[in-house]
Image (spheres, helix red, strand yellow):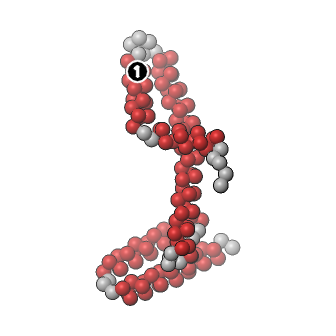
Amino acid sequence: MSAPSLFQRFANATATAAGKPAAFMGAVLVVVIWAATGPLFHFGDTWQLVINTGTTIITFLMVFLIQNAQNRDSAAVQIKLDELIRSSHAHNALLGLEDLDEASLERLRKHYRTLAERSSDRATASQAADDVLDDVLRVKRVLRDDRGAGD
Protein backbone atom coordinates (compact mmCIF):
# COMPACT_ATOMS: atom_id res chain seq x y z
CA MET A 1 0.00 0.00 0.00
CA SER A 2 1.23 3.45 -0.79
CA ALA A 3 1.24 6.25 1.73
CA PRO A 4 -1.56 8.79 1.38
CA SER A 5 -0.63 11.92 -0.49
CA LEU A 6 -0.39 15.27 1.22
CA PHE A 7 -3.72 16.26 -0.36
CA GLN A 8 -5.41 13.05 0.87
CA ARG A 9 -4.15 13.59 4.41
CA PHE A 10 -5.28 17.23 4.30
CA ALA A 11 -8.70 16.28 2.86
CA ASN A 12 -9.23 13.58 5.50
CA ALA A 13 -8.18 15.85 8.35
CA THR A 14 -10.37 18.69 7.08
CA ALA A 15 -13.41 16.46 6.55
CA THR A 16 -12.96 14.94 10.00
CA ALA A 17 -12.53 18.32 11.68
CA ALA A 18 -15.50 19.84 9.81
CA GLY A 19 -17.77 17.09 11.14
CA LYS A 20 -17.03 17.79 14.80
CA PRO A 21 -19.25 19.85 17.11
CA ALA A 22 -16.37 22.26 17.74
CA ALA A 23 -16.32 23.18 14.03
CA PHE A 24 -20.03 23.97 14.12
CA MET A 25 -19.64 26.03 17.26
CA GLY A 26 -16.71 27.88 15.64
CA ALA A 27 -18.87 28.71 12.64
CA VAL A 28 -21.68 29.93 14.90
CA LEU A 29 -19.16 32.06 16.79
CA VAL A 30 -17.93 33.65 13.55
CA VAL A 31 -21.51 34.51 12.56
CA VAL A 32 -22.28 35.92 16.01
CA ILE A 33 -19.13 38.08 15.96
CA TRP A 34 -19.94 39.21 12.42
CA ALA A 35 -23.52 40.10 13.42
CA ALA A 36 -22.32 41.91 16.54
CA THR A 37 -20.00 44.09 14.46
CA GLY A 38 -22.90 45.19 12.25
CA PRO A 39 -23.62 48.41 14.19
CA LEU A 40 -19.91 49.26 14.24
CA PHE A 41 -19.83 49.14 10.43
CA HIS A 42 -23.34 50.60 10.06
CA PHE A 43 -24.52 47.35 8.45
CA GLY A 44 -22.82 48.53 5.27
CA ASP A 45 -22.19 46.78 2.01
CA THR A 46 -18.60 45.91 2.93
CA TRP A 47 -19.77 44.37 6.21
CA GLN A 48 -22.23 42.14 4.30
CA LEU A 49 -19.64 41.34 1.65
CA VAL A 50 -17.22 40.00 4.28
CA ILE A 51 -19.59 37.22 5.43
CA ASN A 52 -20.89 36.49 1.94
CA THR A 53 -17.43 36.20 0.41
CA GLY A 54 -15.97 34.27 3.34
CA THR A 55 -18.75 31.68 3.47
CA THR A 56 -18.80 31.28 -0.31
CA ILE A 57 -15.06 30.62 -0.51
CA ILE A 58 -15.10 28.21 2.42
CA THR A 59 -18.11 26.34 1.04
CA PHE A 60 -16.56 26.11 -2.42
CA LEU A 61 -13.31 24.64 -1.10
CA MET A 62 -15.01 22.31 1.41
CA VAL A 63 -17.13 20.71 -1.32
CA PHE A 64 -13.99 19.41 -3.03
CA LEU A 65 -12.26 18.31 0.16
CA ILE A 66 -15.27 16.48 1.53
CA GLN A 67 -16.08 14.92 -1.85
CA ASN A 68 -12.53 13.60 -2.10
CA ALA A 69 -12.78 11.98 1.32
CA GLN A 70 -16.25 10.63 0.53
CA ASN A 71 -15.12 9.11 -2.78
CA ARG A 72 -12.30 7.24 -1.08
CA ASP A 73 -14.55 6.09 1.78
CA SER A 74 -17.17 4.86 -0.69
CA ALA A 75 -14.56 3.00 -2.73
CA ALA A 76 -13.17 1.35 0.41
CA VAL A 77 -16.64 0.29 1.57
CA GLN A 78 -17.42 -1.07 -1.90
CA ILE A 79 -14.23 -3.15 -1.88
CA LYS A 80 -15.09 -4.51 1.57
CA LEU A 81 -18.61 -5.40 0.45
CA ASP A 82 -17.28 -7.05 -2.70
CA GLU A 83 -14.94 -9.16 -0.56
CA LEU A 84 -17.80 -10.16 1.75
CA ILE A 85 -19.91 -11.19 -1.24
CA ARG A 86 -17.00 -13.03 -2.82
CA SER A 87 -16.14 -14.94 0.35
CA SER A 88 -19.69 -15.74 1.45
CA HIS A 89 -22.44 -17.90 0.05
CA ALA A 90 -23.85 -14.90 -1.80
CA HIS A 91 -23.67 -15.15 -5.54
CA ASN A 92 -20.81 -13.40 -7.28
CA ALA A 93 -23.31 -11.99 -9.80
CA LEU A 94 -23.93 -9.31 -7.17
CA LEU A 95 -20.39 -8.00 -7.58
CA GLY A 96 -20.22 -4.89 -9.72
CA LEU A 97 -23.82 -3.77 -9.21
CA GLU A 98 -22.55 -0.20 -8.77
CA ASP A 99 -21.90 -0.16 -12.53
CA LEU A 100 -25.57 -0.74 -13.40
CA ASP A 101 -27.83 2.10 -14.49
CA GLU A 102 -30.53 3.46 -12.18
CA ALA A 103 -33.37 1.53 -13.85
CA SER A 104 -31.58 -1.81 -13.40
CA LEU A 105 -30.79 -1.04 -9.77
CA GLU A 106 -34.41 -0.10 -9.13
CA ARG A 107 -35.60 -3.42 -10.62
CA LEU A 108 -33.23 -5.27 -8.30
CA ARG A 109 -34.37 -3.18 -5.29
CA LYS A 110 -38.01 -4.03 -6.03
CA HIS A 111 -37.14 -7.68 -6.42
CA TYR A 112 -35.35 -7.75 -3.05
CA ARG A 113 -38.26 -5.96 -1.38
CA THR A 114 -40.66 -8.54 -2.79
CA LEU A 115 -38.38 -11.36 -1.71
CA ALA A 116 -38.14 -9.92 1.82
CA GLU A 117 -41.92 -9.61 2.07
CA ARG A 118 -42.44 -13.16 0.83
CA SER A 119 -39.75 -14.68 3.03
CA SER A 120 -41.14 -13.01 6.16
CA ASP A 121 -44.39 -14.90 5.51
CA ARG A 122 -42.69 -18.30 5.09
CA ALA A 123 -41.58 -20.45 7.98
CA THR A 124 -39.54 -23.20 6.35
CA ALA A 125 -35.82 -22.99 5.76
CA SER A 126 -36.07 -25.02 2.55
CA GLN A 127 -38.48 -22.50 1.04
CA ALA A 128 -36.13 -19.67 2.01
CA ALA A 129 -33.25 -21.55 0.32
CA ASP A 130 -35.37 -22.00 -2.81
CA ASP A 131 -36.13 -18.26 -2.76
CA VAL A 132 -32.41 -17.45 -2.56
CA LEU A 133 -31.66 -19.72 -5.53
CA ASP A 134 -34.51 -18.18 -7.51
CA ASP A 135 -33.22 -14.76 -6.54
CA VAL A 136 -29.69 -15.50 -7.77
CA LEU A 137 -31.08 -16.70 -11.09
CA ARG A 138 -33.15 -13.51 -11.45
CA VAL A 139 -30.14 -11.32 -10.63
CA LYS A 140 -28.06 -13.16 -13.21
CA ARG A 141 -30.84 -12.70 -15.77
CA VAL A 142 -31.12 -8.95 -15.04
CA LEU A 143 -27.34 -8.53 -15.29
CA ARG A 144 -27.18 -10.54 -18.51
CA ASP A 145 -30.08 -8.57 -20.04
CA ASP A 146 -28.54 -5.24 -19.04
CA ARG A 147 -25.14 -6.14 -20.43
CA GLY A 148 -26.72 -7.40 -23.64
CA ALA A 149 -28.75 -4.19 -24.01
CA GLY A 150 -25.60 -2.07 -23.83
CA ASP A 151 -23.95 -3.89 -26.76
Residue located at (50% from left, 21% from top): 50
Q: Position of residue 65 (x, y in %)?
A: 57, 41
Q: Is residue 105 above or below residue 49?
A: below
Residue 151 in view: yes
Residue 103 in view: no
- Quadrant location of the N terminus in the rendered image: bottom right
- Quadrant location of the C terminus in the rendered image: bottom right
**Circle 1 SS class:** helix
Residue located at (63% from left, 41% from top): 7
Q: Quadrant of residue 94?
A: bottom right
Q: Position of residue 146 (x, y in %)?
A: 60, 74
Residue 2 or 119: which is nearer the viewer?
Answer: 2
Q: Position of residue 130 (x, y in %)?
A: 43, 87
Query: How many numbered marks, from 0 up?
Result: 1
Q: Is residue 98 above or below residue 92?
A: above
Residue 130 or 54: which is nearer the viewer?
Answer: 130
Residue 144 or 68: which is nearer the viewer?
Answer: 68
Residue located at (39% from left, 29% from top): 28
Residue at the spot of label 1: 33
Crowd band around label 1 with a 10 angstrom C-alpha radius: few (<14), some (14–19), many (20+): few
Q: Position of residue 60 (x, y in %)?
A: 56, 36
Q: Residue furthest right?
A: 151
Query: Could you tell me the amino acid type at mark 1?
Result: Ile
Residue located at (38% from left, 18% from top): 36
